[in-house]
Amino acid sequence: MIRAYKFLLRPTVGQQQALAEMLRDHCSLYNGALQERGDAWRHVSGTTVRYGDQSAQLKEIRAFDPERQGRWSFSSQQATLRRLDKAFAAFFRRVKSGEKPGYPRFRGVNRFDTVDFPKDGDGCRWDSTPHDPVTRVRFQGVGHVKVNRHRPVVGTVKTVSVKREGKRWYVVLTAEQARSEPLPATGSVVGIDMGIANFLADSDGGFVPNPRHGRKAAAKLEAAQQALSRCKRGSKRRRKAVEAVARLHRKVRRQRLDHAHKTALGLVRAHDLIAHEDLRIRNMVKAPAPKPDPDRPGSFLPNGAAAKAGLNRSINDAGWGVFLTILHAKAESAGREVIAVDPRNTSRTCPACGHVSAESRPTQDTFHCTGCAHQAHADTVGAVNVLRAGLARRNARKG
């Protein structure tokens, strides 16, 4: 089993400069490789340049530029070229499937924030001074950097990454671990229904309130972004304004993660099986298609885009995708079972008689069956139906 760890780095002033130079040079390598691929394709010969061709050039590049490219780990530079190769693979996959292609773009030095080291000990070394009570990680060309290790790392460290977030630096590890002992069985099963008014409702009648971290920070974010828009590009004042906006976004992101971790942990500890809706969040937050006005060419009819934009903000603020990813990871580690079910009609089906009708849900939170007059909270009804569908899928799989 692979688990990731993220720790805050405490670099010195000199080490911060070296880390920034490492990001700068890897960004330059990425952009140069992207330029080479584009130029080769636009050439009359239509040549295709692949990862293997560019990786083979690294030895010459390092020898030609020893002060910059030659300073850093060969393996980390290969990882940067692989990142570009993955971007092109995703581009061609989208072209083939008919999606919006999104050709890989050049990266600005301020938007290239991660360098990967594919193997611990190759250009980097985790816990590089074991005799020292302070944990340190060593990066080639940077030195031994202090790490704020707030919890122990279990297992064998496989990969190491250095990441910049604003003015802070982090080290991200992946460690291979033996599969942990499953939690004791509780005999409990639950279905959950994700929502906006409540973050989730469970089939036992419980609710988890929606913290709405983004909405709470909206006023501060708006003020910070307005201040940023008034700053002159390239000025010191603008750099400070950019950092202020990034700091607010970072706080909201960490609050969402904290809430998702705590909610998922509570579910995993309490239940042996958790059923949830198989949500297609990317499709749910798509903007509505424009409606051309047949009577006035070049004009468009109202399509509800403003209302849909508000709903999309609420969906993104809830962070369903992050929560479900964390829930699956924690359940796998604890030996619990998580089942995703088709969400269609889960909030329109009566759990008492099975009658399906949109009229049974007159309001957002009220369910009143038009067939048998059963009444309940609409989200609870959805969670009960999700649980039933999850149990049916599990039984069918076992059968």
Image (cartoon, rainbow, N blue to C red):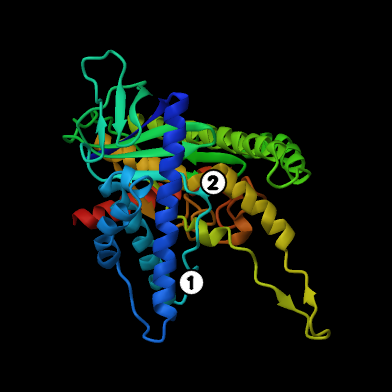
Q: Report the residue marked by disc 1.
A: 101
Q: Which residue is drawn at 42% across and 29% down?
A: 15
Is 46 placed left or right of 354 in the picture? Answer: left
| Other-residue count near label 1 (Cα within 10 Å), few / some / many at <14 / 14–19 / ≥20 | some
| Image: 188 above or below 233 | above
Which corner quadrant holds the C terminus? bottom left
Q: Is residue 205 visible?
A: yes
Amino acid type shown at disc 2: Asn
Residue appearing at x 44%, y 23% in the figure: 12
Give yes or no for contact between labels 1 and 2 (Cβ–Cβ under 8 Å). Answer: no
- Nearer-N-terminus badge (1/2): 1
Mark 1 is on which residue type? Pro
The answer to whether residue 35 is above or below residue 59 is: below
User: Which label belongs to residue 110?
Assistant: 2
Question: Is residue 207 in view?
Answer: no
**Residue reaching furthest left?**
178
C-alpha span from label 1 to label 2: 24 Å
x, y percent for residue 292: 74, 79
* Residue 211 screen position, x and y as percent: 59, 34
Question: As rendered, which of 89 and 239 lies closer to the eye?
Answer: 239
> Would residue 139 appear left or right of 352 to someone viewing this image?
left
At horizontal 51% and vertical 40% (from top left) the residue drawn is 200
Q: In which quarter of the image is residue 86?
A: bottom left
53 or 376: nearer the viewer: 53
Residue 291 vs residue 180: left or right? Answer: right
- On-image quarter of the N terminus: top left
In front of the other: 280 or 244 = 244
Q: Residue 154 vs residue 197: left or right?
A: left
**SS under mark 2:** helix
- Horizontal and vertical percent for residue 388? 38, 50
State which mark lies toward you, 1 or 2: 2
